[in-house]
Amino acid sequence: PGGHGLSPDPPGNLRPLRNVMIRIYTFTYAGDAQEAVACVRCARTALPEAVVTVVDDSAAPVPPEARRALVAHGARYRRSSFPRCGNLRGPECVRGIIATLAGGAADGDTVVKIDSDTALLSGGWVRDMQHNGLALHASGYRVPRNPSERSAYGNCYALSGRTARMAAEALECAAIPPLAPEDLTICRAVMDVCGRERVRLDEPWTPLNRAGRWSWWNWDSRTANPEDYARSYDVVSVGNPRPPHVPKSARREVMRALCDARLNLNSQSIKPCQTET
């Protein structure tokens, strides 16, 4: 695209794949400390070859015991100073996140941003980024006020290293609203600089799309089973609303159970398959 000095990624069969890396970032804070530990464990299970970095909020850092647990699970730990405006919003936050994702990444690297309340259960779709020429892969939805437009859910998305750098350059001088959400803003920037044809937004699981491999934990179900979820889905969020009687600590427990179930499947060498939940 003109003005950025960077051309789109070449097709997958022309891209050099030597020394490429997968880099995973989760941005957390004290309130999600235990979920962040579970998130790192899931990510390290799904993609053991990846470099996982936890970016803590210097204004509300996780406690020392959580930091030790994160490092024990193989994560790198750092703090950011940009304001997060509650839930990763605003110009400084958007620019801080995309600069973090772009920083240090080679063009052929794959960079993943994942929320600390989200479990990555399968890394196949992330590894495929090194071959399929996509600029961004995430789960997405049709914008209600404009059905022809689609946008990404921000709980987990993957970018090529080159795409992250292009988006960072574009957003550095862009006019960003005061409370602009990080996920929508970065997704739109990627579409603008790389083109919609190089963005893949998978429909999440719904009763009308039972093939979807992105989902949320069903807090209202008494029969929701971690083993079924581990077989059926690549990405599961526990950040959706819970019934009043379910404590926040249940999110961590569900993520742990999902990871245990994934590990059990791995040990049995069972290939994940879609099942109804």
Image (cartoon, grey):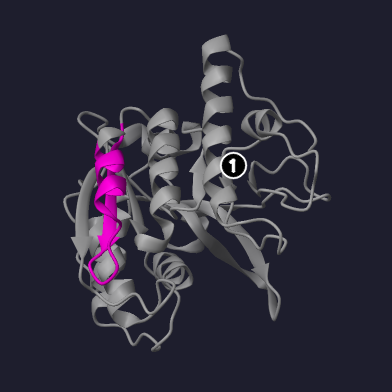
Q: Quadrant location of residue 262? A: top right
Residue located 52% across and 17% down the image: 266
**Which is nearer the eye, 72 or 125?**
72
| Residue 190 drawn above or below residue 209 | below
Residue located 72% across and 48% down the image: 205
Left or right position of 32 against 258 = left
**Which is nearer the eye, 161 or 230?**
230
Residue located 71% across and 76% down the image: 144
The N terminus lies in which quarter of the figure? bottom left
- Numbered disc 1: secondary structure: helix
Q: Quadrant location of residue 175? A: bottom left
User: In the rendered structure, which amino acid carries the disc numbered 1?
Assistant: Val
**Residue at numbered disc 1:** 254
Give the magenta range: 50-71
Q: Can residue 222 be seen in this view?
A: yes
Residue located 75% across and 39% down the image: 224
